[in-house]
Each structure stands twice: as structure tokens, then as C-alpha cells.
Amino acid sequence: MSATTPAGRLYGVGLGPGDPSLMTVRAVEVITGADVVAYHSARHGRSIARSIAARHLREDHIEERLIYPVTVEITDHPGGYQGAMDEFYEEASARLAAHLDAGRSVAILAAGDPLFYGSYMHMHKRLAHLYPTEVIPGVTSVSAASARLGTPLCEAEEVLTVLPGTLPEEELTARLASTDAAVVMKLGRTFPKVRSALERSGRLDEARYVERATMEGERTGALADVDPESVPYFSVAVLPSRVDAAPAPREQGEVVVVGTGPAGPLWLTPETRGALAAADDLVGYTTYLERVPHRPGQERHGSDNKVEAERAEFALDLARRGRRVAVVSGGDPGVFAMATAVLEAAAQDAYAEVPVRVLPGVTAANAAAARAGAPLGHDYATVSLSDRLKPWEVIAERLRAAARADLVLALYNPGSRSRTWQVGKARELLLEFRAPDTPVVLARDVGGEGERVRIVRLAELDPADVDMRTILLVGSSQTRTVRRGTGEEIVWTPRRYPED
Ligand code: SAH
């Protein structure tokens, strides 16, 4: 940059989705006033961006065509694909810098929006901190595609997820299952994988397809009907808003038994989140239903914790009438929770045809263990201290057997307002086999507002500290504790067991 010539301005110009009349007034102004117009293109030389802006280009514009050395083909560059690209970006930005240094303004054309999956960004990162720069936003293909479909994209509290189709199939499946609305970009070769992810996340029926939105050759339709061979890169998949979506007519519903994990949404798996969102009816204990976000059109059937069998039959009856039903438990639905009740009811002839699925959740033992360190790192046993569904003698015998075997113990349902003596009895029994200073994790309301996790010694375990929201993890002879530099005490059980 010489002292006499002020540097030129750099512009990243968003051109919108394809129809030149969808360029902004500012984009046209900037292109018209620029000295240099630059655009990326593949080796064949055609540039979609240039064709969108063509009517605003003049003979006296200097055109800089930035030709990619490779697109998807194999390269003989010693640094491979990345090496070839890095070299290309360096050369291209040096070329534009020379114009800027000479005082010429440079408009880099970008289809859609420049900062949204665009090539412009590679130039921006190399030049914007060195030259005065302005980015002109553009209408993205996301907006263009949903405008073309003419259906709401996302409404009220719905979440819109934008996904590159280049992600691995498992990742796409998880994201599609757990979002409301979605747009998947970069189809083309990725189409079969994206279609499969839509199917696996149970969302293929909702999916729409938009090709070349607002351009010549535009095509829209149901994604399920699209021939994979015919799909170009310039196409997207759209899952529109479900707010007013009529439930698909179904002959057969299903029951999905899910667990919320120990507390709120941070603990939901993507699969469970998806099943909860897709359900027509939610059935469960009111406390657990309250953890699930409200969704218009969805019915909630909250009930008291005790009538499990009735609740299971109620859910199966709904499913038999074509409804998609989620039966909601806390934690994992298979751990002292609704999954067995549902499967037991479903074993009756009347429900033989009703599909039932169980989805795993984060159980209280794992959540509590993680908070305290790694007390379950070696063999452990899970026991419910509730004698509502089994005699205390059975519980006592199992505790003795586990203690004799030197297993760590995860004790669910240790007590409640009406069951107050079980913890005291269990402590006495365990002290026959374990040292008084055995570490015990006392974890209450893990993940919730009343979370309290403490490490106490077995001899000091006080039944008054235990309630319905508490789980106990009792160490084995090998379980260790240490106080960290932060003052916090942590606990773990080594994976190696001593030989005797
Ligand atoms: N299905 C649940 C367990 C249901 S039994 C699960 O997998 O976690 C209910 C018992 O689980 C409670 O009495 C308590 O012992 C434990 N529990 C559930 N959520 C908890 C939480 N957030 N913190 C501590 N313990 C919890």
C-alpha cells in the first residue's frame, strides 16, 4: 500500500438464491460501483454467482475469476486436497490484495449469503482485517426453498436446524430426530445418505425436496418420491413447521417407552427428544411429564405414580387406535420404571399387534456417579430398597450377597416420607462386611434445582438425609476418595482388583 493511494474497499456481496430480482438494492449498488468483480468457479469456468449478477456487469469492470484447482476430483498436489486448496486461497487472496493496494474496490460475488457456507469466507478471513470491508447479506437458499414450498418453516418456539448433507449418517439421524424444523443443504451425492437419515429418524414422510429454488429448472416435491440419481448439488431437503401439520393418517400407532434422564433437557438423548416431539400423546407420572417441553396439538395424560398397569393399558389402547404414544419415565425407562409394566401389559393377546419400543435413558446411578467421580468404575449391583413390590427379606439377602461379593452398590428408592427405616437397616447390614469409613455417595435431585451430592462414610450414613429423590452409591473395599486442589472430594473405584 503506497502512502498516496488509499486502499480500496472489499465487499462480500450476497446475491440471493438465484433469481436476479432477489438481489438486494445494496448488492446492485456495490457491484455497479466496484472496480473489480471477483467470483469463484470450477475448472469448467461457469459461475452461478456471475450469472445471477450478469445484468449489472459492464465492459469496464475488471473481472477476476478465482478458479478452484480441484473440486471433488483427485489431486496430484503434494499436500493433497487441503494443500491444493490452501495454496489456491493464498494465491487468490494475494491477487485481490494487489487490486486493493492499488486503490481499486473489489466486490466478491457470493450466491445466497456470503457468510453462510460460502467460498467468500476464505477470502474474508485473509483480507477483512487488512482492508476496509463490508459484507452485504443475501437471501439464503433456506428462505428461498421454504418460500417456494409456501409452508411455514418454523413458528413460535420451534427450533430450526440447518445441516450440511456431508455429515455422517448417524449424526444427521440424531440431529433430524431431535429438531423441529430442518433444512439439509449440499445434497447431490449425499442424497441417499440424507434420505436414509430421514427415514431412520422417522421423518421421511414430512420431508420436502426443493431443487434450484428461484432458478431455471426449479423443482419441488415430496422427498420420498425423488430419484436419487437426479439430484444436483443445488438442492435442499426441508422439514417444515409441524405446528399445524395434520397427523398423518395411520392404521397402527405405537407405544414408545422413554426416559427423561434424571432431570431436564440436558439429559435427553436425541432419540428420546425426537420420540417425545413426534408423539401425539404423552402418558406418565405428572412430575416426569413436566420435564417435557409443551407442543401444540399434543395431549398429556398425567397420573399418579402408583397405577402403572392401568397406565400401560391406557397407552396401548391409544396406540391400538392409531395414536403415537410416548410413555414417560424418569431416568432410564427400564430401571425400576414403566418399560416392564408396558411390556407386561403388551404380552396380553389384545395388544399382540401393537408395536412397542423402549428407548434408553440416563439412569440416576450413572448421573450421580458422574457427579461424584467414578464410583461405578468396577463391578456393581443395582438394588431398590423399596419393599413395596418385594419382601424386605429378599432385599436384605441381596444386600448381604452383594456385600459378600465386594460389589459396589447403587441403591435406588432408599426411602420416602412413609418408608424411613430401610436405610438404617441396610447400613447395619452392610457394616457387617464393609469398613465404617467406606465412602458412600449421597446424591439428591441430580441435575435438578435441589441437587446436592455429598460423600459420607458408611458408619455416618443418616437415614434422615435420604428422601425419594435420593440415590446412594456404596463403595466396595477398593473404592477410594481424594481431596483435589480445589477442595472438592471425589471418589472412584479402580478397575484393577487385587489378587489374593
Ligand atoms: N427409572 C429411574 C429410576 C426410578 S426409581 C432411573 O433410571 O433413574 C426412583 C428412584 O430413582 C428414586 O427414589 C431415586 O433413588 C432415583 N432417582 C431418580 N432420579 C434421581 C435424581 N435426579 N437424583 C437422585 N436420584 C434419583
Image: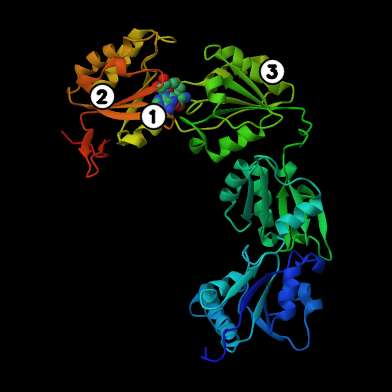
Secondary structure beneath disc 1? loop
Query: Which disc, if any, is residue 121?
Result: none
Check the picture and name the quadrant holding the C terminus. top left
Residue 52 locus on image (x, y percent): 77, 72
Front residue of this view, candidates 335 and 330: 330
Few, some or many C-alpha atoms within 10 Å of disc 2 (few <14, some 14-19, many ≥20)? Answer: few
Is residue 347 something one can see in this rendering? no
The residue to which callout 3 is attached is 317
> CA separation, marks 2 and 1?
31 Å
Few, some or many C-alpha atoms within 10 Å of disc 3 (few <14, some 14-19, many ≥20)? Answer: some
Q: Find the residue positioned furthest to the left.
A: 500
Callout 3, which amino acid? Asp
User: Comparing marks 2 and 1, which lies closer to the viewer?
Assistant: 1
For marks 2 and 1 on the same chain, the one whose residue lies earlier in the sequence: 2
Callout 1, which amino acid? Glu
Query: Which disc, if any, is residue 451?
Result: 1
Callout 2, which amino acid? Ala
> CA separation, marks 1 and 3?
37 Å
User: Is the C-beta separation of discs 2 and 1 under 8 Å?
Assistant: no
Residue 193 locus on image (x, y percent): 65, 53
Q: Quadrant of ligand 1?
A: top left
Q: Is residue 63 left or right of residue 447?
A: right
Residue 419 locus on image (x, y percent): 37, 9
